[in-house]
Amino acid sequence: MGNEMSNNGMVISESSTPLPAGVHLPIYMDNHATTPLDPRVLEAMLPYFGAKFGNAASRNHSFGWEAEQAVDKAREQIAKLIGATAKEIIFTSGATESDNLALKGIAEMYRERGNHIITQVTEHKAILDTCKRLAKQGFRVTYLPVKADGLIDIEDLKQAMDDKTILVSIMFANNEIGVVQPIAEIGRLCHEKGVIFHTDAVQAVGKVPVDVEAMNIDVLSLSGHKIYGPKGVGALYVRRRNPRVQISAQIDGGGHERGMRSGTLNVPGIVGLGKACKLCGEEMEAEGKREAELRDYLKAKFEGALDYIHVNGSMEHHLPGNLNMSFVHVEGESLLMGINDIAVSSGSACTSATLEPSYVLKALGLGDDVAHSSIRFGLGRFNTKAEVDYVSDKVIDVVSKLRELSPLYEMAK
Ligand SMILES: *Cc1c(COP(=O)(O)O)cnc(C)c1O
C-alpha cells in the first residue's frame, strides 16, 4: 500500500488536513487491539529482568522468595481491581489461554453433570473457536443471538438454559463495538440456576467497574496488554467459595497455580500486570470520563459534518473509549487507504486471502458493504484532543472526497 491512493483514476494525495502542534504521525487510535506499555509499568518491571531474576517457585533461597513476594503483590493488585481475593488469581500467558483454560477446564471437570454450554455470537475467537472444539468432543453449544444494539436478550438466555447446562460464557464488553453486556443480570440468573458463569472481561477490566462478588461472576479472563501492561501475560479469576469452582488443568507439569496451570511464572510480566491493574484502579474514573468526552467529541464532529453515518452498538451500554462508526456509501478499502496515517481498525477481517466483513457487525444485521465501510476508533490513555481533531478532520475529508466519486451516494441523496 503506497502513500497515495487512487480511486476511479482520481488521486487522493497526502493529507490536506493540517497537523496540529504536538501531534505526531502515525496516530495510534486502536487501543482495543493492544495498548502501549505505560512507562510506570515498565519501570516496575525492569528490576525483574535484571538482579531480581529468581524463580518464584524456588523455596530455598532469597532469590526465590524475592520473586514470590513480587508475584504475591501482583496477585493482590489484580484481585483488588475486580473484587476478588489473591488466592483466586491464576496466571496465564494471556487472555486467549485464560479463555481456553476456563472453557476446556470447566467442560472437562463438570462433564458428569452435563454437556451443555451457552455463549453468544459476538464473542472473541478465543471463545468461539474453543467452543467449536468442545462441540467436536460432544458438548452441545448454544450461541445466543444479539439484538441490533449488540446486547443479548436475557429472555433468550433463560430459554436456552436446561438441566444439562454447566456453563454460560458471555463477554463483559465487546472488542469491536464496545457494548457492555448486562453482566450482573446474567450473573444473578446463573447463580439462581447453579450454572457456572465465565466472562471474557479483557476489554472491561480497568475501563469500567468490575466486581466479581456483586456481579456473581465465577470465572473471569483478563489480559495485560489491553490495560497498558505487557503482552504475553494474563490471568484467570477462579471463584473459591459460593460456589467453589474447579478447573481441570490443560497444561501439566509441576502443579503451579493451585494445580490449574503449570509452568514457571513470568515474573516481570506478572509484576507489570499487577502494576497496570493498580494504575487502572486509581485512574479509571477520571480516565473513563476523559475518554468518553473525547469519544463524544469525535462522534459529534462526524455527525456535524457527514450524513449517512451511524454508530454501531448501544451507546447507552458502552465502553468510554470506543466508537464504531459506519460511513455508508464509501468503499471500505479506499477509506482505510485514505487515512493510512491513522491506526484504527476496519469492519473487515483478513481471513486468509479474502477480506471478510466482520462477523460482529454482521451479527447486528449490517450488510457486507456497510460492515466494510465501518471503522473502530479505540481511544486510550495516551490519546489527546489534538489527535482527535486531526483524526476527525482527516476522516471527514476523505469520506467527503470518496463520496464525490460515488454514484451510490449520489443516488441515495
Ligand atoms: C485481546 C482479546 C483477547 C485475547 O487476549 P490475548 O491476551 O491477546 O490473548 C480475548 N478476548 C478479548 C475480548 C480481547 O479483546
Image: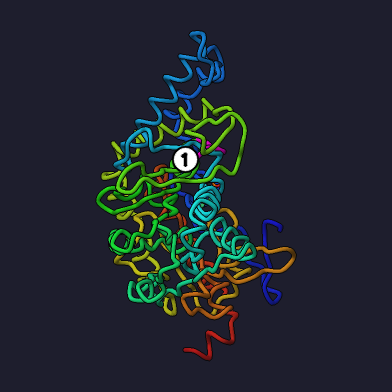
The residue that disc 1 covers is 235
Q: Residue at x 49, y 73 (%)?
A: 327
Q: Is residue 385 left or right of residue 128?
A: left
Q: Give residue 148's position: percent from left, percent from top.
A: 41, 77
Q: Is residue 345 above or below residue 305?
A: above
Q: Give x and y (percent) for residue 268.
A: 52, 26
Position of residue 157 measured from the top left corner of the image (x, y, whole percent): 38, 71
Q: Residue furthest right?
A: 353
In reply to whether residue 258 is colored magenta, the answer given is no
Where's residue 375, x and y in %? 51, 65
The one nearer the camera, 158 or 296, is: 158
Label 1, residues with CA under 10 Å away: few <14, some 14-19, many ≥20: many
Which residue is at 47% across, 40% downward?
235
Q: Is residue 139 above or below residue 160?
A: above
Question: How many labels, in total?
Answer: 1
Residue under the image location 38 percent in, 33 percent down? 87
**Helix, strand or loop: magenta stretch:** loop
Residue 160 position (above or below residue 134): below
Query: Residue 307: in sight, yes or no?
Result: yes
What range is drawn magenta here? 230-234
Q: Is residue 338 visible?
A: no
Give the amino acid at mark 1: Ala
On screen, residue 1 versus residue 216, left or right, reads right
Q: Nearer the viewer, residue 69 or 44?
A: 69
Between residue 38 and residue 189, name the one nearer to us.
Answer: 189
Q: Residue furthest bottom?
A: 411
Instruction: Classify the position of the N terminus by image quarter.
Output: bottom right
Figure colour scheme: rainbow
Residue sitting at x 38%, y 63%: 179
